[in-house]
Amino acid sequence: MATSNKIALVTGAGTGVGRAVALALAKAGYNLVLAGRRQEPLDNVAAEINKIGQQALAVSTDVSERDSILALFAKVKSSFGRLDVLFNNAGIGAPPVPLEDLPFETWKKVVDTNLTGMFLCTQEAIKIMKSQSPRGGRIVNNGSISAHAPRPYSVAYTSTKHAVTGLTKSASLDCRQYDIAVGQVDIGNAITPMTARMAEGEGVLQPNGTKMLEPRMDATAVGDAVAYMASLPLDANVLFMTVMATKMPFVGRG
């Protein structure tokens, strides 16, 4: 495969935000490596990217497993020889139960996926980016509105997303010396399978104990935002960007 074109890796690329970002980057001229647990959705996105006129490599990956991450980045290096953009997107939630009732195994799976997996992907991306020529690249982490404020009964997801903010800041500082820019996009209510419950039945639980339907936005808005971040020269960086449904209940008192 060609090594002269720009290469982007998107985790959790088979659906939702990951798919939207992968397509936006393809339209911006990137060849894509698509990572996710299920091969079929990745293959479907790869076919969409091929129609745009860019290359796409679909690699089944479980970011909660270190060996799976190492195999993914080895595939990136052997197939393309470089990496220009990493979008750390893969993440999971947990059932909305009282904090004291959350099973340890569920807590650990969310932490392993949302935080440890993102840390390991960042490590491996840095190793490639700092040693390639031309040197450098960009890493964008998927935070969340939950990186700012929690929903009820969301301790595992919210804790990991607050931690992602710390990872973003630390990586942004530590990677300056390698010409690697690190930023974060905090997303609120994009239309994805994960947010489907916000538009169904009575909606989702609010801090005051009521339930309500919540406005959502098309995930293409997130794709366009990340593509913009990726378009910047490496001497400029969007450290944090919030992209949210305009009318979602976030700004204001709960």
Image (cartoon, rainbow, N blue to C red):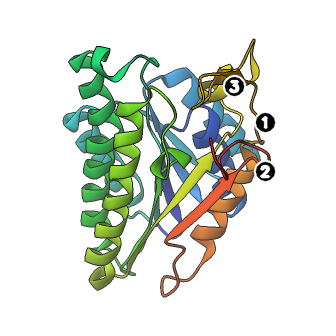
110 versus 119 height, above or below: above
**SS of the residue at dot 2?**
loop
69 versus 125 height, above or below: above
Measuring from the top left, give residue 47's x and y in whole percent.
Answer: 67, 35
204 versus 132 height, above or below: above
Q: Name the residue: 54% across, 51% down.
A: 32
Measuring from the top left, give residue 98's x and y in whole percent.
Answer: 38, 18
Viewer-closest of 11 and 80: 11
The residue singled out by tag 2 in the image is: 246
Q: Earlier in the sequence, mark 2 or mark 1?
A: 1
Q: Earlier in the sequence, mark 3 or mark 2?
A: 3
Q: Residues within 10 Å of mark 2 (few under 14, many from 20)?
A: few
Question: What quarter of the picture does the C terminus occupy?
Answer: top right
Q: Name the residue: 61% across, 31% down.
A: 15
- The amino acid on which the numbered mark 2 sits, given as a three-letter code, is Thr
Give me the C-alpha separation between circle 3 and circle 2: 15 Å
Would you say residue 162 is visible in this rendering?
A: yes
Q: Quadrant of residue 188?
A: top right
Q: Is residue 172 left or right of residue 207?
A: left
Q: Residues within 10 Å of mark 1 (few under 14, many from 20)?
A: some
- The amino acid on which the numbered mark 3 sits, given as a three-letter code, is Met
Q: Residues within 10 Å of mark 3 (few under 14, many from 20)?
A: some
- The amino acid on which the numbered mark 1 sits, given as a three-letter code, is Pro
The residue singled out by tag 3 in the image is: 198
Q: Is residue 162 left or right of residue 215?
A: left
